[in-house]
């Protein structure tokens, strides 16, 4: 059974995933990092050259590939839950943990991230986070087996909570 971390970027999936994987003696795979490695391009380059739909196609293939393995910790990209087939395949072999944080905390954590292009293109940074979360929260809720609030907790506390719920 895989441990799958879902949630908006900046909620701690990558950092918490490292701790969970180390404690369980498992390998950690990040869908975004694996896409970058296989495409030999950054996510902004992929999106600029081919568009978001192409990136989402790569993401779906990566979710399928990783879900086909057992005993992994999988850190998904924030938009992986946008396609029902991704959720379906990840749930088949994994338990999904939705990591959450406030808009303000997310903005603080990802403010300097240049590896993700804008999802809306025209809004302020905070407005974009709010709008994207408004769209995605119902999808995260539907996909999640467990909700883990990361606000005001250390990464160790969040990892402990995931391991307790496992």
Image (cartoon, grey):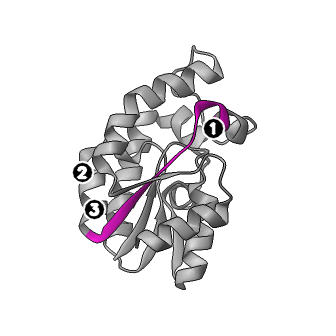
Left or right: 140 in relation to 42 = left
Question: What quarter of the picture does the N terminus occupy?
Answer: bottom left
How far across and how far down the image is residue 80, in percent?
40, 47
User: Tags 2 and 3 in contact by the CB under 8 Å rule?
Assistant: no
Task: State the residue at coordinates (55%, 28%).
Answer: 129
Label 1 crowd bin: few (<14), some (14–19), many (20+), radius 10 Å? some
Q: Earlier in the sequence, mark 3 or mark 1?
A: 3
Q: Is residue 82 magenta?
A: no
User: Tags 3 and 1 in contact by the CB under 8 Å rule?
Assistant: no
Q: Gap between marks 2 and 3, in whole Å?
A: 10 Å
Q: Residue furthest bottom?
A: 25
Q: Name which quarter of the figure residue 82 lies in.
A: top left
Q: Is residue 140 above or below residue 20?
A: above
Q: Gap between marks 1 and 2, in whole Å?
A: 27 Å
Q: Residue furthest right?
A: 112
Left or right: 14 in relation to 56 = right
Q: Is residue 62 above or below residue 49?
A: below
What label does residue 106 carry, if any?
1
Q: How many marks?
A: 3
**Which residues are the magenta region?**
93-106
Q: Earlier in the sequence, mark 2 or mark 3?
A: 2
Label 2 crowd bin: few (<14), some (14–19), many (20+), radius 10 Å? some
* Disc 1 element: helix
Q: Is residue 82 above or below residue 6?
A: above
Task: State the residue at coordinates (47%, 36%).
Answer: 50
Q: Is any atom of residue 82 visible in this view?
A: no
Q: Which residue is mark 2?
A: 85
């Amino acid at each position: 059974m895989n441990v799958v971390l879902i949630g908006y970027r900046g909620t701690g999936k990558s950092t918490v995933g490292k701790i969970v994987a180390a404690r369980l003696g498992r390998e950690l795979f990040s869908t975004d990092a694996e896409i970058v490695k296989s495409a030999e391009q950054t996510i902004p380059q992929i999106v600029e050259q081919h568009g978001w739909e192409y990136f989402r196609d790569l993401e779906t293939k990566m979710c399928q590939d990783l879900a086909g393995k057992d005993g992994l910790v999988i850190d998904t990209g924030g938009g992986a839950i946008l396609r029902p087939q991704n959720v379906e395949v990840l749930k088949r072999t994994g338990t999904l943990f939705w990591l959450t944080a406030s808009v303000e905390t997310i903005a603080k954590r990802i403010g300097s991230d240049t590896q993700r292009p804008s999802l809306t293109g025209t809004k302020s940074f905070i407005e974009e986070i709010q709008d994207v979360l408004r769209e995605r929260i119902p999808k995260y809720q539907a996909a999640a087996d467990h909700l883990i609030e990361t606000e005001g907790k250390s990464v160790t506390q969040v990892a402990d909570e995931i391991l307790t719920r496992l």
